[in-house]
Each structure stands twice: as structure tokens, then as C-alpha cells.
């Protein structure tokens, strides 16, 4: 029999058993919905990882010293240790001038005061090298320059959040607000003098982040709680004291290094460790991380979530498949007579098998289409409400989902169709 | 056309040796004959008809159809013969209830792999020939018993068979419509089709050119 005729007969059968078909569609569409959701999530995650890596660069690593509280044994905890210093960063720069970035960092925190407004804030001490790490900003005023660093200038640069085009639902739910960001959004501080800790600073620049949807950093929180106030690292060392005043005088917290390419990371990792240890007579306890590792750790959580969704999707579509199998088996028992008639007038076993398989595949197809319609509506809704993952839905995802649904129909109907084809025509004809 | 030699059919039964429905039957039917097979219930009439119509294989013996020994044909080979060489007419019509008269008649043509347009044309012609012009789009439920059997006849003729097999074709019809169906069969036989009919009714059997009486799985006369 020609395919077109089989399709016509199959559609007729589906149409004649409305409730049965509806239930199967229902099961299949739930599977398709979960598949669509997982596909979008997986795609979004890979896309973001790639974007984030593009922004930070593939050859990034971070050198830190292990703090005594990070050690496990008492002996290690009590051992005298050296700290990284600004001079170490300078030495790296002189010894490896080919490195695209050697950016020493130091963090502290303090009360930010301007007029009536005050808010506790994290402050980062930086050098001009900071600019080279994932620059996504639009600058008003100016950035910190070498002169500021050299002269311990009391100047600062403030990072202003880009905000959302459309705020995600969960943000509204938690109702969390960053007071500092709310304040600077409504008060232009450029050129003003503000109080940070115990000293006065001039705001020389405002760095405007792109809207959060377009900011790759949103999706991949690499630096943790990012400091939104930047001052020269030398000023921070002198006036605030690093690590909330705990750090040894003259020390810095970490050095961020860009080796240019991913393959160069291990090489430089060895060289840099060797150089730093030589400078400190082996008294450094270094903790070197390359960003590839950091990203992998960050992504591990998301991966776990993904697998959960994917497994739920697989289970749903499996349930749909079992539904199809059940329905096809039930159909066969209610159509034994028909099978007998068809066999009597000359249908081969293959014809009977093909008929039931095509019917089940059509069930899968229509169920898949229904699932696509529902999930596309849902995804559109979520995306409209600011779910950035859902914005990444691709044209090929519905296609893959429908193929999965049709394939489920095919696989689930193989056994019942085989059973149908095995029926003895004489027996089947006699069946009432 | 048909030659059966020592034809046997044994149905397996639990524990017992099995039930022998045909016990070494010899039969030969020439092309163009109208044969009526009669006999009491359980004498093996239907079993014989199923074997002649390639629905079943004999347990032993030879069945030669147009010179070919078909007793050991595979399932798909027998399906092919059913499709193109024979047409079946059943007591309970055995039409597909959700299909229209036209679609029922087209079905064997579609299994032969023919296209949609030509099958429709031929099916319409066949329905007109059995006197069902204008009822092509009716489903079996909307037709009377006699009309249903006419659809059955039209379907049996769909692929121009050489042999028409009828199993109690008038069993579910009143005598008036039964006669009409019989007239149709006789006419088809006159046009050259070989017809084999199974019946209880000796009146109907009398209309055939040859009567084969069966008893206990063998031919009496």
C-alpha cells in the first residue's frame, strides 16, 4: 500500500477515537515540552559559557596565597608565610613582558557616605591593568590612570549596574534591592567628593555596565560579589588596609594573569610559580587557579539541574511511549476482525505492521505538534517575563522535539504491530 | 484450475492428537465451473474453502493451483495469491465498518500498490456493476444486508480474480435478496469466472453447475 493511503487511513483512525488519541497526545506533549525546555536550557548554558570565556579570554589564571585558615593541619596554620606583594606583580610584568595582562588586586570594605546616604560597600584596589579584564563598560569621566596609582591619589571609579530590560520574575519575587545601585542611578556622582571609610575621594569616572541581559558577566558569575567601587591599589594599601584591615602591610590579595591562549596556561603556571617562589625564598603558599577550572566548577551546578530536567523529559516521553504502546495493543485487540479482513483480501504481514506503525507515528507526530504549540507559548511567556535562558530558543529545537515524538511512536509500536502481523488470518476472521 | 490430492488438515488440540478436519480429500475443479460445496456443519467445508483460498495451508497432501503446487507457499506468497488470484465473499460480509463502500472496494487495489485516481475509477465502475450506483459514499452501517453483500462482491472483484470463493454468501440475507445475490454470482460465472460456493441451502446449490457433497472431512459425491 502506498504511504499516502496509509497516512490517510491512520489519520482516519486517530480521528475516530478522539478520547484515546487525546490522552496519547497529552502524554506525548508533556514529553515534548520537557524536551524543549531542556534543549533550550542546554543551549543557553553552552552559549553563555562560550560568551563568558570570550569576554574573560581563554588564557586566564589567578594567583593567590593560601590563607592560614585554609590550611588543614595546625602546623601549616601556624607556619610563617609570605604574602604576595605589588612588587611581585611588577616582577611578573618585567620577567614576562609578553603576558597580555598582569593585574594585581586587593579588596577591602568601608562605609560609603554622600550627603545623607550611607551604605557599606566593597572596595577593590586595582591598577590600570584591570581594564584588560573583560571590559564591557561604557565610561563617563575617566578611568584610573598610572598617575593615580603612583601618587596614591584619593580618587575612585564607580560601576553602575546596567539594569534589566525586563526584570526576571524571581527578582521581583525576592524583592531584593541594591540600595547603593538605586542611589547612584538617581544621583549623578561624577566629579563629586564622597567619603569612603575615613577618607574623602573624588569620583573621577562612572563605568556603565550594559543591560544585564546583554552582559555576559550576568550569566557567569566568575568573580563572586563584585566590588562596585574601584580605587588605586596603592591608595587602598595605605588608607584602608587590604582584606578588611587584616592583611599584612604591603601585601595584595591576588594577581590575575592573562596568558593569551588556553594552551599557554600550564606553561606559565609553572614559570610564574617558580619565579614567585624564588622571590620569596619558598615561603609562599600559592593557590593558582586557571579560569577554565573555575568555570567548570561554576557550571557543574547548572549541569546537575539540566540533567534533572532532561531525565524528567525522558521519563515523560517514555510514559508517552508506553501510552502509545498500550493504545496500539488495545487497538489491535479491538481490531482483530479488521486485521483478519485485511489479511483475507491480500494484505501481507508487512502491510499490517506498516499500518499500525504509521498510525502510532502519526499519534506521536500530532502529539509532538501539540507539545510544540504549548511549549512555544510557555517559552514565549517566560522569555517575555525576563527568563534569559528561554530567550535562547532556536528554530531547530521544535524540529528535534517532533522527531523525538515520532521516533517514540515508531519504537513503541514495533512490538504491538509485530503481534498484529502474527495473527492467523483464519482465526482473526472468525473473531467476533 | 484446482487440483487437490490427498488433502489433509489437522488442527492441534491440547493433549489429544488433534482434530482432523480434512481426511485425505481429492478434488479437481476446472476453470469456468460453478461449484457448490454442501454438507452438514463441521464436515470441513470452510476448512477446504480456506485452503483453496490460500488462507490456510494443508497439513498434508498437495494443492495445485493453475498447475503450481502452492501447499508449501510462504505467508507472503499466499498473501500475493489472495490479493490477485482470488476474491472472497463472506457470510457476514466482513466490510470495514468505518470505510465507505467505495473505500472498501478500493482496499484490495491499494494493497496491490495502485494509485488513488485509477482505483477510484475502477471501484466506481464495480459498484455500478453490482447495482450500487449512488451509494458509493455510504458506510456499511448505512446499507441494507443485500447492499452490503453487493459491496462484498464488488470488493472480491477488485483485482480481476480468476477465482471467486463464497462462504454462505446468502446466509445472512432474506430469501429475496439472497436470490438477487445468487443471480449476480451466476452472471459472473457466465462471464467466465470460476465460482466456488459453500452453502447449506440445497435450493441455492441447485443453481450451481456442480454440487460437491462433503461428510466428515471427505467428499461423499
Image (spheres, coloured by chain):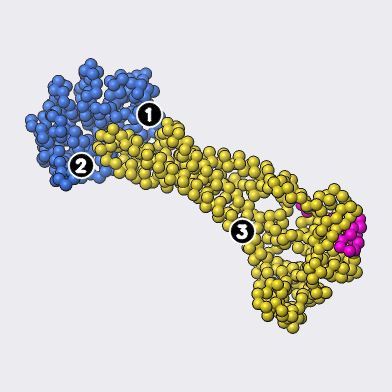
Chain colours: A yellow, B blue
> In the figure, A252 relative to A277: above or below?
above
Residues drawn in magenta:
A190-211
Q: Label 2, label 1: how many angstroms apart (C-alpha)?
A: 31 Å
Q: Quadrant of the C terminus of chain A?
A: top left
**Quarter of the image where one finds residue B113:** top left
What is the chain identity of the residue bearing mark 3? A
What is the chain identity of the residue bearing mark 1? B
Q: Label 3, label 2: how many angstroms apart (C-alpha)?
A: 65 Å
> In the figure, B211 relative to A151: above or below?
above
Is disc 2 placed on a helix, strand or loop? loop
**Quarter of the image where one finds residue A150:** bottom right
Between marks 3 and 1 in the image, the one whose residue lies nearer the viewer: 3
Report crowding for label 1: few under 14, some 14 to 19, many 20 or more residues within 10 A (C-alpha): some
Q: Which residue is label 2 attached to?
A: B57
Indicate the position of residue B1 as horizontal and vertical percent values: 17, 34
B200 vs A52, left or right, is left
Q: Which residue is label 1 attached to?
A: B98
Tags 2 and 1 both on a single chain: yes
Is disc 3 placed on a helix, strand or loop? helix
Between marks 3 and 2 in the image, the one whose residue lies nearer the viewer: 3
Q: Label 3, label 1: how many angstroms apart (C-alpha)?
A: 55 Å
Is disc 1 placed on a helix, strand or loop? loop
Residue that appears at 37% across and 41% down: A329
Of marks 2 and 1, which one's residue comes earlier in the chain? 2
A273 vs A370, left or right, is right
Indicate the position of residue A403 as horizontal and vertical percent values: 50, 46
Indicate the position of residue A331 as horizontal and vertical percent values: 37, 37
Report crowding for label 2: few under 14, some 14 to 19, many 20 or more residues within 10 A (C-alpha): many
Indicate the position of residue B92 as horizontal and vertical percent values: 26, 27
B135 vs B199, left or right, is right
Tags 3 and 2 both on a single chain: no
The answer to whether one can see residue B125 in this image is no
Amino acid at each position: 500500500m502506498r504511504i499516502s493511503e496509509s497516512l490517510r487511513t491512520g489519520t482516519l483512525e486517530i480521528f475516530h477515537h478522539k478520547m484515546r488519541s487525546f490522552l496519547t497526545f497529552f502524554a506525548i506533549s508533556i514529553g515534548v515540552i520537557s524536551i524543549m525546555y531542556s534543549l533550550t536550557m542546554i543551549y543557553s548554558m553552552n552559549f553563555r559559557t562560550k560568551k563568558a570565556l570570550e569576554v574573560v579570554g581563554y588564557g586566564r589564571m589567578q594567583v593567590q596565597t593560601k590563607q592560614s585558615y585554609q590550611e588543614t593541619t595546625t602546623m601549616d596554620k601556624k607556619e610563617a608565610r609570605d604574602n604576595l606583594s605589588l612588587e611581585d606583580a611588577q616582577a611578573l610584568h618585567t620577567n614576562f613582558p609578553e603576558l597580555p595582562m598582569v593585574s594585581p588586586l586587593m579588596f577591602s570594605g568601608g562605609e560609603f557616605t554622600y550627603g545623607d546616604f550611607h551604605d557599606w560597600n566593597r572596595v577593590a584596589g586595582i591598577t590600570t591593568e584591570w581594564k584588560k579584564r573583560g571590559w564591557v563598560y561604557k565610561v563617563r569621566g575617566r578611568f584610573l590612570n598610572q598617575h593615580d596609582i603612583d601618587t596614591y591619589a584619593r580618587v575612585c571609579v564607580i560601576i553602575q549596574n546596567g539594569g534589566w530590560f525586563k526584570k526576571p520574575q524571581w527578582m521581583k519575587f525576592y524583592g531584593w534591592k541594591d540600595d547603593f545601585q538605586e542611589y547612584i542611578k538617581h544621583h549623578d556622582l561624577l566629579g563629586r567628593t564622597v567619603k569612603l571609610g575615613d577618607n574623602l575621594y573624588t569620583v573621577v569616572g562612572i563605568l556603565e555596565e550594559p543591560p544585564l541581559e546583554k552582559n555576559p558577566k550576568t550569566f557567569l558569575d566568575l568573580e563572586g560579589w563584585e566590588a562596585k567601587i574601584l580605587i588605586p591599589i596603592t591608595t587602598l594599601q595605605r588608607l584602608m588596609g587590604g582584606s578588611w584591615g587584616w592583611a599584612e602591610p604591603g601585601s595584595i590579595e591576588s594577581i590575575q594573569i592573562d596568558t593569551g591562549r588556553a594552551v599557554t596556561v600550564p606553561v606559565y603556571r609553572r614559570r610564574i610559580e617558580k619565579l614567585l617562589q624564588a622571590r620569596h625564598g619558598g615561603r609562599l603558599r600559592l593557590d593558582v587557579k586557571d579560569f577554565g577550572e573555575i568555570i567548570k566548577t561554576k557550571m557543574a551546578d547548572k549541569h546537575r539541574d539540566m540533567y534533572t530536567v532532561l531525565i524528567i523529559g525522558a521519563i515523560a516521553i517514555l510514559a508517552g511511549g508506553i501510552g502509545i504502546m498500550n493504545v496500539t495493543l488495545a487497538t489491535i485487540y479491538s481490531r482483530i476482525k479488521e486485521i483478519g479482513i485485511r489479511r483475507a483480501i491480500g494484505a501481507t504481514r508487512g502491510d499490517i505492521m506498516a499500518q499500525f506503525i504509521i498510525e502510532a507515528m502519526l499519534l506521536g507526530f500530532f502529539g509532538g505538534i501539540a507539545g510544540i504549540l504549548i511549549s512555544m507559548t510557555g517559552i514565549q511567556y517566560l522569555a517575555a517575563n525576563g527568563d534569559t535562558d528561554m530567550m535562547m530558543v532556536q528554530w531547530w529545537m521544535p524540529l528535534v522535539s517532533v522527531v523525538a515524538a515520532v521516533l517514540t511512536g515508531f519504537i513503541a509500536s514495533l512490538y504491538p504491530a509485530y503481534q498484529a502481523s502474527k495473527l492467523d488470518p483464519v482465526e482473526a476472521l472468525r473473531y467476533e | 484450475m484446482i487440483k487437490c490430492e490427498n488433502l489433509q488438515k489437522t488442527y492441534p488440540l491440547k493433549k489429544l492428537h488433534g482434530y482432523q478436519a480434512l481426511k485425505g480429500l481429492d478434488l479437481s475443479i476446472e476453470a469456468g465451473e460453478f461449484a457448490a460445496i454442501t454438507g452438514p456443519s463441521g464436515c470441513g467445508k470452510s476448512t477446504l474453502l480456506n485452503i483453496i483460498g490460500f488462507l490456510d495451508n494443508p497439513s498434508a497432501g498437495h494443492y495445485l493451483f493453475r498447475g503450481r503446487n502452492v501447499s508449501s507457499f510462504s505467508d507472503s506468497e499466499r498473501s500475493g495469491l489472495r490479493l490477485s488470484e482470488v476474491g472472497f465473499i463472506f457470510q457476514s460480509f466482513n466490510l470495514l465498518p468505518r470505510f465507505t463502500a467505495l473505500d472498501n472496494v478500493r482496499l484490495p487495489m491499494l494493497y496491490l500498490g495502485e494509485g488513488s485516481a485509477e482505483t477510484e475509477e475502477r471501484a466506481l465502475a464495480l459498484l455500478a456493476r453490482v447495482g450500487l450506483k449512488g451509494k458509493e459514499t455510504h458506510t456499511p452501517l448505512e446499507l441494507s444486508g443485500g447492499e452490503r453483500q453487493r459491496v462484498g462482491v464488488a470488493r472480491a472483484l477488485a483485482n480481476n480474480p480468476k477465482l471467486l470463493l463464497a462462504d454462505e454468501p446468502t446466509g445472512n440475507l432474506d430469501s429475496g435478496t439472497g436470490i438477487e445475490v445468487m443471480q449476480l454470482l451466476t452472471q459472473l460465472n457466465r462471464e467466465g469466472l470460476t465460482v466456488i460456493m459453500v452453502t447449506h441451502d440445497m435450493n441455492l446449490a441447485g443453481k450451481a453447475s456442480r454440487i460437491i457433497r462433503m461428510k466428515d472431512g471427505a467428499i461423499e459425491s
